[in-house]
Image (tube, rainbow, N blue to C red):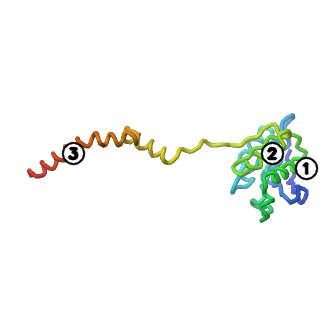
């Protein structure tokens, strides 16, 4: 069953939020399951969860997918105080309360991980889990260069200097021989 789009105006903490559920509907949870609350990152919107919605809907999960304050069609307050993580967390708690969510699992991506971490700090008893997708740290450019050098020359850069010095005599002999042959022509 899909709930109709819910528009919460003024009932959330001290400012208004709009929960966009028409594109990404609120789905009631399967029996004894928690709702998943998905928080997108910068510069994205709730639409970025649409592929996950299809999967979770198929498996009977309840979902709340919302646009974060300051994004897409949301209010864009210019006062930085309204973006304090604890205030964003309070807004999400108000949404959960308004939607009758007793227990949830928060999935925070990118900047959505910031209010997710505050929810974990301040309201952990309301949640059975927190998910923050993390990717493997990229190799540093220096390490990448070292790897390329080693693959190309069979030595790392530390050994490469020694290899150049060791082979300098052979190169000089080759160059001398080539010069001598060139003079004979």
The residue at 80%/43% (across/down) is: 121
| Image coordinates for residue 122, horizontal then vertical, percent | 83, 44
Measuring 73% from the left and 41% from the top, which residue is drawn there? 131
Question: Is the C-beta separation of discs 2 and 1 under 8 Å?
Answer: no
The image position of residue 98, as x and y in percent, is 90, 50
Q: Secondary structure at mark 2?
A: helix
Residue underneath mark 3: 172
Disc nearer the start of the sequence (3/1): 1
Viewer-proximal residue, 68 or 180?
180
11, above or below 132, in the image: below
Question: To which residue does mark 2 refer?
Answer: 119
| Residue 36 image offset from top left, x and y in percent | 80, 42
- From this view, report whether residue 61 is shown above or below residue 115: above
User: Would residue 137 be found to the left or right of residue 73 on screen?
Assistant: left
* Secondary structure of the residue carrying numbered label 3: helix
C-alpha separation, residue under disc 2 versus residue under disc 1? 17 Å
Density class for disc 2 (Cα within 10 Å; few <14, some 14-19, many ≥20) is many
Mark sitting earlier along the chain (2/1): 1
Q: Residues within 10 Å of mark 3 (few under 14, many from 20)?
A: few
Which residue is most to the left? 184
* Front-lying residue, 66 or 28: 66
Count of picture labels: 3
Residue at (85%, 38%) from the top-left corner?
A: 125
Residue under label 1, please give it. Answer: 98
* Mark nearer the viewer, 2 or 1: 2
Q: How many residues crowd mark 1 within 10 Å: few (<14), some (14–19), many (20+)?
A: few
Left-right relation of 174 to 67: left
Give me the C-alpha separation between circle 2 and circle 3: 68 Å
Give the foreground label among 2 and 3. Answer: 3
The x, y position of residue 180, in whole percent, is 12, 48
């Amino acid at each position: 069953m899909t709930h109709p789009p819910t528009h919460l105006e003024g009932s959330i903490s001290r400012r208004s939020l709009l929960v966009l559920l028409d594109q990404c509907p609120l789905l009631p949870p399967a029996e004894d399951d928690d709702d998943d609350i998905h928080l997108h990152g910068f510069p994205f919107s709730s639409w970025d969860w649409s592929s996950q919605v299809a999967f979770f809907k198929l498996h009977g999960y309840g979902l709340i997918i919302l646009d974060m304050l300051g994004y897409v069609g949301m209010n864009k307050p210019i006062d930085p105080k309204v973006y304090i993580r604890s205030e964003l967390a309070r807004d999400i708690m108000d949404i959960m309360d308004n939607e009758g969510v007793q227990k949830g699992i928060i999935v925070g991506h990118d900047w959505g991980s910031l209010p997710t971490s505050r929810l974990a700090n301040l309201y952990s008893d309301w949640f059975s889990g927190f998910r923050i997708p993390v990717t493997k740290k990229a190799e540093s450019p220096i390490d990448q260069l070292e790897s390329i050098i080693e693959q190309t020359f069979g030595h790392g850069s530390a050994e490469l200097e020694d290899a150049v010095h060791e082979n300098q005599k052979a190169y000089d002999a080759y160059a001398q021989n080539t010069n001598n042959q060139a003079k004979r022509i």
